[in-house]
Amino acid sequence: MKRRQILKSISLLPLAGTTLPSIPFEAAAQTPKRDLFSELGLRTFINAAGTYTMLTGSLMTNEVVEAINAVSKKYAQLDEVQDKVGAKIAALCHAEAATVTAGCWSALVLGMAGVLTGMDPKKVAQLPFLEGTGMKSEVLLQKSHSVGYDHALTNAGVKLITIETADELERAINEKTAMLWFLNREAPKGKIQHEEWLSISKKHNIPSMIDIAADVPPVENLWRFNDMGFDLVAISGGKALCGPQSAGILMGKKALVDGAKINASHRSGIARGHKVNKEEIIGMYVAIDNYIKRDHAKEWKMWEERVRVIDKAIKSVPGVTTEVFVPAIDNHVPSLRVSWDQEKVKITKEKLAENLRMGDPSIEVISWEPDSMIRINVFMLQNGEDKVVAGKIREELSKASI
């Protein structure tokens, strides 16, 4: 800067006693980040339980968080975001169409609504009051599959009819039957398996939907049920996919997905409150794209090693028995059951879980199942946390030993 420019700048400064404007120094940007968990008095914990909603699901990957932050800086048309992202997800999952929903429950509600209304806006406005509309009003499912999640379907106004055998299913089908619904998690408990269920669905030209909320891994399940022939597939986004916890995916036949979409989002259908913003939609796309590209074999070996570390530490406590296993369908990852001889280790599963929860660090395990044991899932652990979990559980069991 030349001398006379400097003098000119000085002459423009405010007089003494007036306030100088603040200068945005580079150092000002280095303000320490707020620790909101501490500020709000919230307990954080090591998640050795799994991707349960009450435990806030999974942690989003860095790529998902970066995507959410990046797209939050600009506007976009919501319908266009859904259409473009839906097309990408559909291609990845071998489906005709897909849409991002406000979780798996939302996918069930929207899918049911789309089956009932198609693209008819008059029908959209009539939901959930089906009487006198001419719309079909019954959904058939196996009794063993009615464990609570099926209630999502009733949000659209339908009545649930449970059956147990293929013969009962055939007899229950009538002019009111809107859909056949299948809960994949409960497949082993049902008398009708996927292929027979689909065969009956197609024989009567009735749409079928399957709920696979927590049923990846394996990664192949993302397209297995589309390839199998289900008309609609619903999945959670905030479990093993590590997408936004409040997001999910509905995918399947284009006509039905299109029908679901006009019942949702910014429109005034029954799912107006099932809004998904552009950040979650695009974050869900990044999550599923990244998930498919992972080295799944390497990840599985890492989980096995984590289980081995915990298993080795715990089973050395006298009176403690462990079992390494893999759940058949949901949360299909290497896991550990831990039980103990109550005469040698004087602690209940509830008290053990409480001690772990209230310890430092806090640890969550599965203790709410009916058996007298705890269960440990390792696929939500961060690096090094397996050793912490192993040490703390061993410590608590050892203290209770006599």
Image: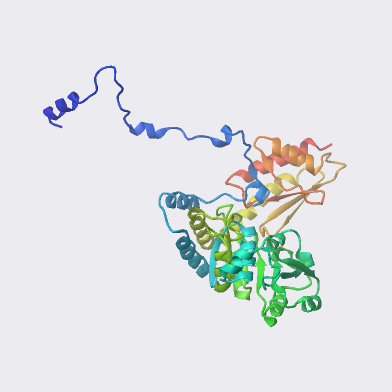
Position of residue 258 in the picture relative to residue 167 (left or right): left
The residue at the far bottom in this view is: 203
Residue at image coords 49%, 50%: 65
- The front one of 390 and 380 is 380
**What quarter of the picture does the C terminus occupy?**
top right
Taking depth in this image into account, of 73 and 196 the one nearest to the observer is 73
Residue 373 seen in this snapshot? yes
Whether residue 190 sits left or right of residue 231 in the image: it is: right
Q: How many marks?
A: 0
Name the residue: 51% across, 54% down. 277
Place of residue 43 in the rendered image (x, y in percent of width and height, measured from the top left): 63, 37
In front of the other: 393 or 22: 22
Q: Residue furthest top?
A: 17
Q: Quadrant of the N terminus?
A: top left
User: Which residue lies at the image location 58% right of the left edge and 66% below the top edge?
Assistant: 260
Does residue 216 show up?
A: no
- Give the left or right position of residue 184, taking residue 22 as reference: right
Residue 139 position by quadrant: bottom right
The spot of residue 373 in percent (x, y) is 79, 48
Compared to residue 274, the image places residue 18 above or below, namely above
Q: Position of residue 255 (x, y in %)?
A: 56, 73
Q: Nearer the viewer, residue 341 or 380?
A: 380
Q: Name the colour scheme.
A: rainbow
